[in-house]
Each structure stands twice: as C-alpha cells, then as structure tokens.
Amino acid sequence: MEAGLILRKLYAKEGVSDLEYIKWLQDIGLLAKGYFTQKQIKKELGVVYHTVVDWFNFCRELCFEVAINMSEQIGGPGEIVEVDESCFSERKYNRGRKRVSQQWVFGGIQRGTSKCFLVWVEKRDANT
C-alpha cells in the first residue's frame, strides 16, 4: 500500500481527487500558520470540525517531533541566543483551568540562523 493512503482514507472525503487532496493539505498548512481559523477550513473543505482539529493536532505534534529530533548545540562567542520556557498540559475533561498533567519544555533559537534546540525538563527550578 502506498504511503499516506491510510491517512487519506481516514480523513479525506470519499472520492476526493488528487487536486482536491492537495488543496486540503494546503488549507491545513495555512491553518497551522494561522491564516485561517478551524471553522473557515471546516466550511471550505466540507468536513466535520473534529477532522480539522485532528489534522491540526497532527501537524502540531509533527512540528514538535521535528524540533526535538533536530535540536543542536547553538551559540558561541558573539552569538545571541534567545531562550524561553513553555508548559505543555491538558485540561481536565477539556474544561476549565485545572491541569491534569504538565510538562515543561525549554527552547532556544540563535538569532540570524535557523539553528534551535528544544529540551524536555523534569522540573522547572533554579537549577534547571
């Protein structure tokens, strides 16, 4: 079976041509970049909202995996490195602000280049 056919069968409408499929992927890419809302993509593609959310989550997870796997040592004399932290968590029952689980991530990017790093950390404290 060709690579990608399973995802295509799961998420694309039945009988979608290759051209429509390419448009579908482009729209998901534009959604990921923030050009469209999920509701706009749902209306344009004629799919259920849940499908658009699944694709958006897939794209986000893919980008995160690439960032983790392609992390490299950055910086050096005269180089500026911007570092930030972020908390990845889930909301309890998808409601409210109570956090079920939290995972802290530190990341950095070297100015003027595309070099970056992303690191999971066990706990967020002064020693980290």
Image (tube, rainbow, N blue to C red):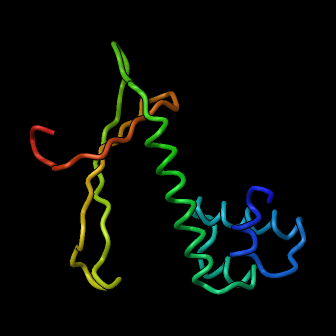
Q: Name the outermost residue toward the front.
A: 1
Q: How many marks?
A: 0
Q: In the visual, does 123 lie left or right of 13? A: left
Q: In which quadrant is the C terminus drawn?
A: top left
Q: Where is residue 108 in the image (x, y as percent from the top left)?
A: 36, 37
Q: In the visual, does 41 lie left or right of 109? A: right
Q: In the visual, does 126 lie left or right of 88? A: left
Q: Which residue is at a point 49% across and 58% down the rendered structure image? A: 61
Q: Where is residue 74 in the image (x, y as percent from the top left)?
A: 39, 25
Q: Which residue is at a point 48% across and 48% down the rendered structure image? A: 65
Q: In which quadrant is the N terminus drawn?
A: bottom right
Q: Which of 3 and 86 is in front in this view?
A: 3
Please tell me in which quadrant of the rendered image residue 38 appears.
Answer: bottom right
Please tell me in which quadrant of the rendered image residue 101 appears.
Answer: bottom left
Q: Which residue is at a point 51% across and 28% down the rendered structure image? A: 113
Q: Name the outermost residue toward the left.
A: 126
Where 7 falls versus 96 (above or below)? above
Where 4 falls versus 64 (above or below)? below
Q: Which residue is at a point 30% across and 66% down the rendered structure image? A: 89
Where 97 falls versus 120 (above or below)? below
Q: Where is residue 111 in the image (x, y as percent from the top left)?
A: 44, 30
Q: Where is residue 19 in the image (x, y as percent from the top left)?
A: 89, 65
Q: Which of 1 and 58 is in front in this view?
A: 1
